[in-house]
Amino acid sequence: MSAVRKDSGTRGATTGGTVGGAPQRPLRADAARNRARLLDAATEVFTTRGVAVPTEEIARAAGVGVGTLFRHFPTKEALLEAVVVRRLETITAGTARLAAEAEPGEAFFACFRLIVEQSAGKQEFTRALAEAGVDVHASLRESSELMRAQLSEILAAAQRAGAVRPGLGLAELVALLVGVGTATEQLAADPAARERVLQVVFAGLRAH
């Protein structure tokens, strides 16, 4: 039995509940604030302490009661799924902004850094959800497709600008992002080492 499943429940699936991590209908302003606080707290706690942390501690960190948590997220899986979905949505929004505001080469490397930095804990999250029987790929399909489309455009623009080596394809870029994200997660306690890894990878990605 997974750590996620152990702490699941079915309490409070009422107004403001979720389906696939998204609100069923628009929330009141106070309810929306509580949901955002819960997601912020869950992201921080799950990333730093792992997915086995009880939901009661998530509620405490968010400054709300556990009943409020379960009204928004009737199971721990629903909360964890919402964290994963929101993280990917945050990444896609960030890459879109960088692509619009920065030069192609600068946007490419900034997006690479953003995705790596936001990947902390992702593998543990998705593994826990899969073990709990949640179809993670279905939950993330729309955001993942948008992310890949954005990456393809950002990569092509950087290559046209002569900032990134021309032989690199989208599949290789995605593989690099996954690999570097995993590698740098092992160096969470050493920011300087993480930066050195990124700089080595960036040196290999630049056009010569």
Image (cartoon, rainbow, N blue to C red):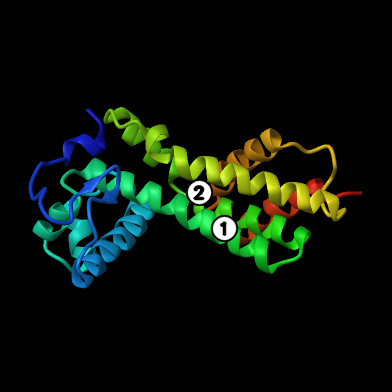
Across and down, in percent, residue 101 comes to: 67, 69
User: Of 22 and 46, which appears nearest the observer?
Assistant: 22
Label 2, on which residue?
A: 119
Q: Is mark 1 on a helix, strand or loop?
A: loop
Across and down, in percent, residue 155 comes to: 73, 48
Across and down, in percent, residue 90 comes to: 47, 57
Q: Is mark 2 on a helix, strand or loop?
A: loop
Q: At x 71% / y 67%, what residue is drawn? A: 102
Label 1, on which residue?
A: 190
Q: At x 25% / y 66%, what residue is drawn? A: 32
**Which residue reaches farthest bottom?**
30
N-terminal of the two: label 1 or label 2? 2
Numbered label attached to residue 122: none
Asked if residue 198 lies left or right of residue 17, the reply is: right
**Which residue reaches farthest right?**
208
Viewer can see residue 189: no
Residue type (three-letter) at the residue carrying disc 2: Ser
